[in-house]
Amino acid sequence: MSRKEPNPLKKQTSSVTADKSAATPCKVTTSPMPTPMDTRSATAALDTSVAPTSPPYGVELIMRYFPDLTSTQQQQFAALDALYREWNAKINVISRKDIDLLYLHHVLHSLAIARFCRFAAGARILDVGCGGGFPGIPLAILFPEARFTLVDSIGKKIKVVNAVTEAIGLQNLSAHQARVETLQEKFDFVISRAVTEMKPFIGWVWNKIERGNRAGSLANGILYLKGGDLEAELNATGKAYTLYDIHEQFTEPFFETKKVVYFPR
């Protein structure tokens, strides 16, 4: 696969055609990246009284990249630190060594999807293998007019998601202990974070995505957070995809190898 170093105002697009006998090399082209979203759902001044809660990266990190949050959204994001610390002491949903980096490794990482796709009001988003609520909960805070369904096969993780959702007053999110294969509903977007390799994941969710609809700034499809060298794994899917480099949006070293993978339906 040939590859260009991405321009900060460009995106990489790879089209893959399935071949019965051998993998077909991908052709990489570039085209303009989607305009970063305006997160404002109502005009509100930034609440500078909100203090960092997880040094060295607290809620101020989120407000640096998303300065147009409403006061409600600021409060919801700020509340996540204490809530996840409390629940992580009972149920290990986040690595113990990672809890001080909650906003960097989990919240901001989840929000990377929003830098490349703006969900429309009424958009139906399915988070598969949500664990303790990532990326679904941060995105549900950011897009209060979209509807989020979170599923995980492990009941204790869904217990945490429901508790956090209730505590911060999210009205646009429901969470269920279920395997995605059992769901009957259709969705506009499927989101996830490093649950499994892409080929089996696509097999689980492809028929759950509504075709011929556009419920966001991108056409309906899969938005998947993943890192590392993905060329062979993505080519094996036999489907067209786009790779977005998160480090073009977020400058912290943690994001240097992190991507948003987009499969249009």
Image (cartoon, rainbow, N blue to C red):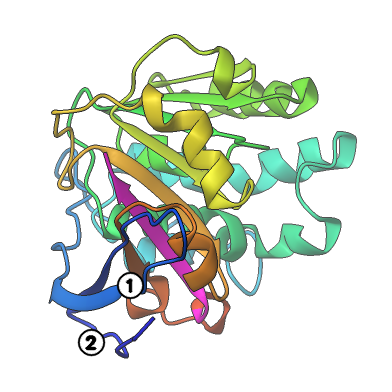
Q: How would you classify the magenta stretch by its main secondary structure?
A: strand
Residue 26: image tag = 1
Q: Is residue 223 visible?
A: yes
Q: Which residue is mark 2?
A: 7
Query: Tag 2's secondary structure?
Result: loop
Q: Is residue 257 found inside the magenta-colored segment of the image?
A: yes
* Residue farthest to the bottom, as pictured: 5
Mark 2, residues whose alpha carbon is within 10 Å: few (<14), some, or many (≥20)?
Answer: some
Q: Nearer the viewer, mark 1 or mark 2?
A: 1
The answer to whether 211 is drawn above or below residue 104 in the figure is above
Which region shows up in magenta? 256-265
Q: Is residue 79 found inside the magenta-colored segment of the image?
A: no
Asked if the residue under mark 2 is in contact with the one under mark 1, i.e. CB atoms within 8 Å, the reply is no
Question: Relative to the observer, which residue lies in front, 259 or 68?
Answer: 259
* Residue farthest to the right, as pictured: 90
Question: Relative to the observer, which residue lies in front, 221 or 237?
Answer: 237
Asked if residue 38 lies left or right of residue 6, the reply is: left
The residues tagged by marks 1 and 2 sit, at their Cα atoms, a distance apart of: 19 Å
- Image coordinates of residue 150 in percent, x first then y, are 53, 26
Residue 208: image tag = none
Name the image quarter holding the C terminus.
top left
* Residue farthest to the front, as pictured: 21
Examine the image and state in which quarter residue 215 appears: top left
Mark 1 is on which residue type? Cys
Examine the image and state in which quarter residue 182 appears: top right
Asked if residue 109 lies left or right of residue 185, the reply is: right
Name the image quarter holding the N terminus.
bottom left
- Image coordinates of residue 165 in percent, x first then y, are 55, 25
Q: Is residue 50 visible?
A: no
